[in-house]
Image (spheres, rainbow, N blue to C red):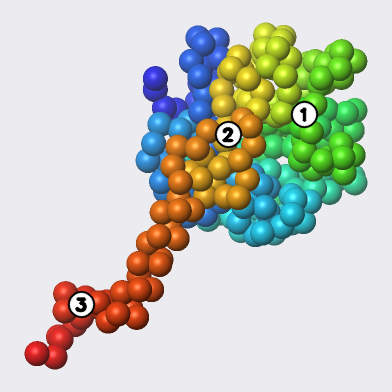
Amino acid sequence: MTKVKSKNNYLAKFLEMKQQGEKICMLTAYDYAMAKCVSATSVDLILVGDSLGMVVLGYADTLQVTLEDMIEHCSAVRRGAPDSFIIADMPYLTYHLSEEQTRQNAAELIIQGKADAIKLEGGSGTRVQAIKAIVDMEIPVCAHLGLTPQSIRKFGGYLVQGKKPEQQEELLNQAKEVEKAGAFMLVLEGIPELLGKEITEAVSIPTIGIGAGRYTDGQVLVYHDLLGYSDMQPKYVKQYANLNNDIKAAIELYAQEVKSRAFPAAENIYFPIT
């Protein structure tokens, strides 16, 4: 498997990966240090998600995240991953009120946030128009369907979507519509595996799953969930480490060594008294 290395051909490369059956790997990052780690791996692209509201800023949901938050964190990620392809989430209410505001906010994420593309949630008629408006500005757009976190008040919580036949038909139609609108990629979240497979086969753009089963063209996880560095563990998450335990253990060891005077030792001191 070959990591996408040149941003000059990223759209064509992601499409080629779908066509050749090569899985696309996406991971979130929210700051310089995370981005530096992710960019040193074979992860293909970075998502600066509004999930930062929950895992970094301590909010109960993503609805509190502002455009300023996204710009600040996205630009930090760019500094840590200067050569990576970066998608930035458009926060709640930044693409809902008017086409002019939608265009302006998307442009700020590209110009100030240094993102390569933006992502927005939903597939309604107004969302399709928003995608068209942003694509018309030569800004690549990643769509997001299924369990869209900015809609949790409408859904009544973080609930799997597309369980009923009429919901499945609607999501399938929305996937086709966002593709027609110009989206270059589609995130599918929290839907049955069969629906994820059907949508992936029905559209020509790559699909990236998060809780959407094995048959999407790629996968995305939240950095903190993957590393066991959050309090949440949805069913779709596999933990590859347990940083919560490791970090707390390291900090406790440091505290005990300070209290016992084991730290700092002579090797940690400039010109120690002999």
Vertical relation: 17 (above or below) 233: above
* N-term-proximal mark, 1 vs 2: 1
Quarter of the picture containing the N terminus is top left
Quarter holding residue 135: top right
Q: Please report contact status of discs 2 and 3: CB closer than 8 Å, yes or no.
A: no
Residue drawn 80% across the image and 48% down it: 92
Task: State the image coordinates of residue 127 (x, y, percent, origin top left).
Answer: 84, 33
Vertical relation: 124 (above or below) 267: above
Find residue 160 and name its label. 1
* N-term-proximal mark, 2 vs 3: 2
| Residue 158 appears in the figure | yes
Which element is circle 2 on? loop
Residue picked out by circle 2: 237
Task: State the image coordinates of residue 181 (x, y, percent, origin top left).
Answer: 78, 23
Residue drawn 87% across the image and 13% down it: 165
Q: Give the residue at the far left of this rendering.
A: 274
Find residue 265 and name its label. 3
- Of the pair 98 and 175, the residue shown nearer to us: 175
Quarter of the picture containing the C terminus is bottom left
